[in-house]
Amino acid sequence: MIADFSLEGVRRTVFGRGAAAKLSHEVELLGGGPVLVVVDPNVLQAGVAEPALTGLEDAGLEYKVYSDLTREPEPSEADAAAELGKSLGAKVVVGVGGGSALDLAKAAAALINNPGSAVDYVGLDLLKEPAQPSIMLPSTAGTGSEVTFTAVFTRRSDKFKGGMNGRLLYPHTALLDPMLTVTCPPYISAVVGMDALTHAMEAYTSLAATPVSDMNALRAIELIGGNLAQAVAHGENLEARENMLLGSYLAGLALAQAGVGAVHAMAYPLGAFFDIPHGEANAVLLPYVLAFNLMACPDRFADMAYALSEMPDDLTTRDAAEMCLSEVILLSQDIGIPANLDELNVPKSEVPAMAQKAMTVARPIANNPRKVAAEDLEAIYHEAFEG
């Protein structure tokens, strides 16, 4: 029996080399400007956003750039971006960059049409009015933020990490140009690539998985497994970059459809307590949570093994499931992911507090294929210190 499910999400996807230059056309399809463009400052400085911005200028579309954002944005940064959008009378909001820039753009688009501040909408489905139409241009292949209904923030003052979530946050258009990812540095490419793999694997093993999320997740695992090492080792390899961007996109769709699990719940405290980037936290924790979850769904782990890499035909389900874990560890080692939490300078004394905080990340905990309690999370964190 197929479980009941419903689907919604990003309304339009445009994929291809040079797609960023089509931004003005996509804006005009939505009725034209003015346009608020939220851009990661490093992406802006590197000139990665230039094709998109030049296209807006050539089309005579009024726009303003907001780039005063940090690596893991505070809610106040979304408020500031929204205020700029309101003063401009922005009809469309564009995000260019990694997950933080895209999340901030989604939040600003929502706050233009909803009163109050970003902190007022941290939770699920708290927005009352639809966001302004938004267009997302990812410059990394990993976060999947271009197709999700989440905008994540970090409040450093009280060590809180959480987000605005809900159907009214979905972007209108995902504009996917592999050329924007070519200059992404090797380590960042590695970390965000493992972030995308985490999305796909957690979606595939989620208790909320559907036939559609399964399809997207397995294809994402196949694309990432076959291309991430090449994208890290040879950043100019356009075929690898193209496949990684498609894999990240499909993993994002799977995430949006099925949710994620304990890796994400455990990564949130690492970001909130120690300002560790979300993708890096996911990448380090993934093998340890997979090892904990394997016994709950070995058949699903076996499926992921065959998607991730070539496997002998005569493996038992259990053997294939264990090979999945081995392949993830080997890939992490090959691309330079830290092997344990010691390498991230996380103090062991914070394990109990992190476990308690992770247990409050309710939906990922509920989605995890193996039931978890705080003591389980403490044990996984300790395993992640020992490597």
Image (spheres, rainbow, N blue to C red):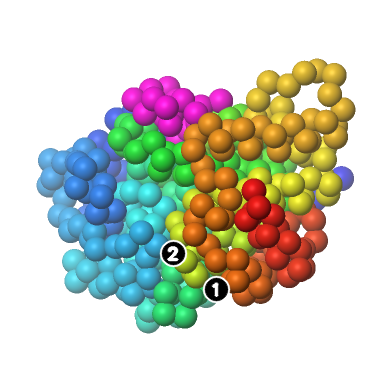
Q: What segment is highlighted magenta in the picture?
A: 226-246
Earlier residue among tags 1 and 2: 1
Type of the residue with mark 1: Gly
User: What residue is drawn where x is 33% and y is 75%?
Assistant: 76
Please report the residue visible at 13 percent of the width from the left and 45 percent of the height from the top: 57
* Residue 11 screen position, x and y as percent: 47, 48
Q: Secondary structure at mark 2?
A: loop
Q: Which residue is mark 2?
A: 275
Please state which of the two labelled residues, at mark 1 or mark 2, is closer to the viewer.
2
Please indicate, yes or no, whether residue 360 appears anywhere in the rendered image.
no
Q: Which mark is residue 123?
A: 1
User: Which residue is at a point 25% across and 50% down the rendered structure image?
Assistant: 42
The x, y position of residue 85, in whole percent, is 25, 66
**Residue sitting nearer the eye, 87 or 104:** 104
Q: Position of residue 239 (x, y in %)?
A: 42, 22
Residue toward you, 37 or 92:
37
Residue, x 33% and y 53% (percent of image)?
Answer: 95
